[in-house]
Image (cartoon, rainbow, N blue to C red):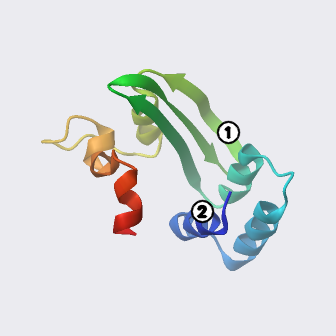
């Protein structure tokens, strides 16, 4: 995990300074697994990791939710639905005109990762 990704995790989770320092030390260790990093980052609340791999409409998505240092959902991989299930655990509910939780929180605007760098 890059320093930039670690900063984004800490900024989005609202971790305390003490936990931020612990997370930063953990993330700097080459032997820390992504699951261990997410467990540490979720000590103060709920955190979701998700990923997608689609090309030409084919592919899959995966999600895992951590809370208070424990894995509480997943990891689950499926053609569809895994991300929305994780978002439901976070308390996200569909708000029309959105079709699902993913769209409700605006993640549909970030489907093309090539544009992420341009926007950041």
Q: Identify which residue, 8 or 43, lies in the foreground.
A: 8
Tell me: residue 16, above or below residue 70. Answer: below
Which residue is drawn at the image coordinates 51% and 65% (left, top)?
12
Left or right: residue 44 compared with residue 117: right
State the residue position of label 2.
5
Quarter of the picture holding the N terminus: bottom right
Q: Secondary structure at mark 2?
A: helix
State the residue position of label 1.
71
Tell me: residue 42, above or below residue 102. Answer: below
Mark 2 or 1, which is nearer the eye? 2
Count of number-bearing discs: 2
Which mark, by number, is residue 25? none
Mark 2 or mark 1, earlier in chain:
2
Q: Identify which residue, 46 or 120, lies in the foreground.
A: 120
Quarter of the picture holding the C terminus: bottom left
Q: Residues within 10 Å of mark 1 (few under 14, many from 20)?
A: some
Residue 89 percent across, percent down from the top left: 47, 39
Which residue is drawn at the image coordinates 43% and 20% (left, top)?
79
């Amino acid at each position: 995990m890059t320093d930039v990704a670690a900063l984004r995790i800490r900024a989005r989770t609202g971790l305390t300074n003490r936990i931020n320092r612990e997370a930063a030390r953990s993330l700097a260790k080459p032997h820390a697994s992504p699951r261990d990093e997410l467990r540490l980052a979720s000590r103060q609340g709920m955190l979701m990791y998700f990923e997608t791999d689609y090309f030409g409409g084919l592919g899959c998505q995966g999600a895992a939710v951590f809370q208070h240092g424990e894995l509480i959902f997943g990891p689950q991989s499926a053609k569809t639905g895994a991300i929305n299930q994780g978002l439901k655990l976070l308390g996200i509910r569909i708000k029309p005109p959105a079709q699902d939780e993913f769209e409700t929180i605006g993640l549909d605007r970030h489907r093309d990762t090539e544009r992420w760098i341009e926007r950041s």
